[in-house]
Image (tube, coloured by chain):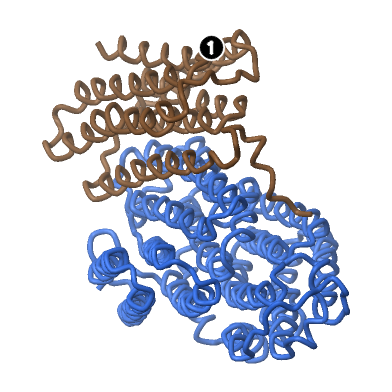
Chain colours: A brown, B blue
Amino acid sequence: MISLLIISFGITLIYLSIAERMRTYNTLIALQGLMLFFITYIELKNIDVVHLLLILLETLIVKVIVLPYFIHRLLIRKNGDKPVALVVPGFVSLTVVTFIFFMSFLVSYLLHDDQIQVKYFTGAMAAIFTGLYLIIVHKQVFTHMMGYLTIENGIFLLSLAIGNEMPLTVNLAVLLDVFSSVLILGLFINRLEMFSSLDVDQLKDLKDS
Amino acid sequence: MVTTYFIAAGIAILIILTFQRPLVSHGMVMVFIGFLAAMSINEAQSFENPDGYFFKADALGVIFLFVTLIISFFAAIHYIIYAQKRSQAPSVIAIHNASFVVFVTAISGTFLSTHIGMLWAFLEASTLSGAALIYHDRDKLSLEATWKYLFVSSIGVTLGFAGIMFLSIAAHNTPNYISELVSVAPEMNIGWIKTSFIFVLTGFSVKMGIVPLFTIDIDAKDSSPSPIGAMFSGPLMSMGFIAIYRFYQIYAHTSILAWMNSVLLITGVLSLFLAAVFILKTNNFKRILAYSSMEHAGLILIAFSTGVNGYLVAILHLTLHAFAKAGLFFQIGQVHRTYQSKIEEECGNYFKVSPVGSIALLAGLLAIVAMPPSGLFMTEFLLFKSLMISGEWWIVFVVMFLLCFFVYAIVRKFFTLIFINNPNAKVIEHVSPLESLPPLILVSIVLVFGVMSPDFLIRMITDAIQVLPK
């Protein structure tokens, strides 16, 4: 079951690389959150109830419901479901993300470390590097934020791959930070309307001379 | 005491945001700084004793706590004048002051954290509150700087979190308390800890203002109010340093010590080189100061990379630089008010307009270009000495060569501001000489420390670096 969920998570990454509409990105990020919820539930149901509730709160409530709703309400409903300009052709992105996936698997497999679970580690590495790739090749702040959320999901999967349990207070602080950072990022994207478009090329007023 | 301090910070934020009156708001910031002072004194008296599950002050934490306390106090005073002169709306003042309290709490929390996860949470909290502080003026430039800071800093801190995960793999899930990690360090997998260190250095470079994520730090110091520029150049830089230092402290007990020093050396030299290139190009005084901070951050890393000879030098340099640069940021804020500009071509003849302010600027320049009697002269001299002892002669020449660019750029541009008559410079406001008192006090600390060796500080730093291998 977990393998199936990880593969589905991987498919969302590939789809993200060629998605063209803001709504599609938002749905894919919510879907990733849902998969992370099921993976966490299956993997961690033996840990104590408070920890489990906290992690489920992070995945199901924050990643699947609150953030996608917030992004939809603040950015998509207000500005319309605009198409996202693809700087790199979809075919190239598809090839790059597939290559990232292949390399992540190869590295995870070759590590031979008892400490990590290969399938989680592959998904995590692929998500982190796909997120970075999305940020590099896109010029719009919206897709940059989606890239950031993909990296966040990759880090979450990485923590599952390692299975190191943080104390409850630390988990709570991490959850609060991640939640508020995305909330504030969203708020600032909303303010960026004064730049007339959501293109990073508009953000070039700060310079040395 | 730490718990009381956090509760006090929470109550202060609540009161500031609820009442939104400037007097209450500024008053609460001062009360909060009073709590910070009490907590710092308490930690100094009982350091090495655990304070709760996640906090314990070591000598380094105590030094940086006091640096943060002094600079925060002056920043709070300067902000009162800043808000008054610009007739800021009560809500804007309230948001600034609440964010300021969160920012200072996050910075002080980082200095005291004994758990790597908690340290990370404070770093992220400083990003969020820092973004609100940069956005203070609510204009196009501050919005651009805020967006870039928030986004790149979030990415950086996330990469740092990946570094923590790699450390967990290497430590075979040992609880992430620094002391426990140090004890299992010799058994850690070399590949994982090298990867972890690279991720941590890259991610937290955003806080220290070094290569690779330095650009947003420059923009943030330029676009935020001057008191915040001072906070970014002093306490925040110390926060970035301590975040990297905690990992160094763990990994120094493994065989990658020499490799880490090489990485720090390369990062330091690259930071110095890029800062030298950009400082020549800019004509904006706040950006000149920001690039100068990057230069000093580079020097700190180079000093640290020399190992046992350079640890003390690096920490002393960081401490003294924080005071000097904060003083200069406060003073340049007054220059900005005088001319309503921070651009070289629109300012000039400042000595005639404000003799006291000019003396503060000149003393600050003396301090940051490391001319005697500046304390930074002493640390740079010791840096070169430790590089020579390590046999790194080519680094000595490269660093000396690059430092010439900084001295030239800073002195030429600031002398133009102070002494050259510029017909384009329009004096809009005369600032009271009393306002130059805090910059003079801060810069004097650096100059006095250059003449009289700060024995208590050196003793504390020596104590702090005992945890590192000889």
| Quadrant hosting residue B347 | bottom right
Q: Residues within 10 Å of mark 1 (few under 14, many from 20)?
A: some
Horizontal side, residue A13 vs residue B429: left or right:
left
- On the rendered image, what quadrant is the N terminus of chain B found in? bottom left
Asked if residue B462 can be seen in this view, the reply is no
Q: Nearer the viewer, residue A40 or B291?
A: B291
Q: Which residue is drawn at 78% across and 75% down?
A: B426
Horizontal side, residue A129 vs residue B293: left or right:
left
Q: Which residue is drawn at 66% across and 86% down?
A: B447
Give the amino acid type for the residue marked by disc 1 in the picture.
Answer: Thr
- On the rendered image, what quadrant is the C terminus of chain B found in? bottom right
- The residue that disc 1 covers is A98
Q: Is mark 1 on a helix, strand or loop?
A: helix
Q: Nearer the viewer, residue B194 or B31?
A: B31
Q: Nearer the viewer, residue A180 or B44?
A: A180
Horizontal side, residue A159 vs residue B418: left or right:
left
